[in-house]
């Protein structure tokens, strides 16, 4: 699952070559991909050239993986249609865990101070819909925030581009419990009893870990 800014080249042919060169093996191993769009992705054809390789049926969509319902959003444009869809979809799933993935974070304290649109339009829906975990990127670092309104927020933009510095958070934000200026990726493991998350560094070292329970 990607958290956006999948392509900095802004050239569809280059993106395809880069993706297949790095991740072309996933299809042969029957690993499903679920992409989201970042601000860099939509500069050419609104990102549609990425849909096939990233397993995206549209700009925003839902996936069920075992005990988890994934809600993959397009945070570049938070129109009423997408918001109504999310509100309804959160209310109809019977999954144990509800996980949202998107590019722009509600809360972040680094190169950016979160996204006001996300806080205004999406955070109330997350809380009302009993979302457990929200994953976002945009800030090139790792940050984890204490649960607020029942929701845990994680930022991970350390996929490979130059890292951004960290700074003090506004008092209105949930308490930041971990922050690292490092590259890496996230690993989620879920069952009916727990949702466990690990932040993995470039060489496989676990940099942070936490668990959520029903």
Image (tube, rainbow, N blue to C red):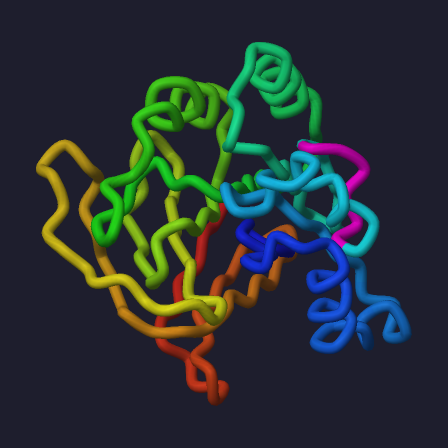
**Relative height, residue 189 to residue 213 (above, below):** below
**Where is residue 86 drawn, in percent x and y?**
61, 22
Q: Nearer the viewer, residue 83 or 98?
A: 83
Q: Is residue 56 magenta?
A: yes
Residue 141: x, y in percent?
33, 63
The answer to whether residue 74 is left or right of residue 107 is right
Determine the residue positioned at 38% across, 44% down: 152
Residue 213 within the segment the image draws in magenta = no
Q: Which quadrant: the N terminus?
A: bottom right
Q: What is the magenta range?
A: 54-59
Residue drawn at 36 percent across, 76 percent down: 207
> Residue at image x 82%, y 77%?
25
Q: Is residue 8 above or below residue 91?
A: below
Instruction: Return the residue found at the far bottom.
Output: 203
115 left or right, relative to 186: left
Residue at the spot 30% in from the left edge and 36% down from the top edge: 148
**Residue 118 point in image, percent of width and height:** 39, 28
Q: Is residue 44 left or right of residue 66?
A: left
Q: Position of residue 61 (x, y in %)?
A: 71, 33
* Magenta region, main secondary structure: loop
Report how many numbered discs are placed on residues in the image.
0
Residue 81 or 15: which is nearer the viewer?
15
């Amino acid at each position: 699952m990607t958290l956006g800014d999948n392509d900095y080249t802004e050239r569809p042919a280059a993106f395809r070559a880069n993706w297949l060169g790095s991740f072309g093996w996933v299809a042969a191993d029957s690993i499903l991909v679920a992409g989201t769009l970042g601000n860099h992705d939509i500069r050419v054809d609104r990102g549609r050239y990425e849909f096939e390789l990233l397993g995206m049926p549209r700009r925003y969509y839902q996936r069920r993986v075992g005990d988890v319902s994934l809600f993959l959003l397009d945070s570049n444009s938070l129109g009423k249609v997408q918001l109504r869809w999310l509100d309804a979809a959160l209310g109809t799933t019977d999954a144990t865990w509800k996980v949202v993935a998107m590019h722009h974070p509600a809360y972040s304290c680094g190169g950016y101070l979160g996204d006001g649109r996300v806080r205004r339009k999406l955070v109330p829906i997350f809380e009302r819909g009993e979302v457990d975990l929200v994953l976002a990127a945009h800030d090139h670092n790792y940050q984890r925030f204490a649960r607020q309104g029942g929701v845990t927020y994680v930022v991970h933009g350390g996929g490979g581009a130059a890292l951004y510095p960290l700074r003090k958070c506004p008092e209105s934000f949930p308490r930041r419990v971990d922050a690292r200026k490092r590259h890496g990726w996230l690993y989620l493991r879920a069952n009916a009893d727990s949702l466990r998350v690990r932040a993995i560094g470039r060489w496989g070292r676990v940099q942070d870990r936490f668990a959520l329970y029903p």
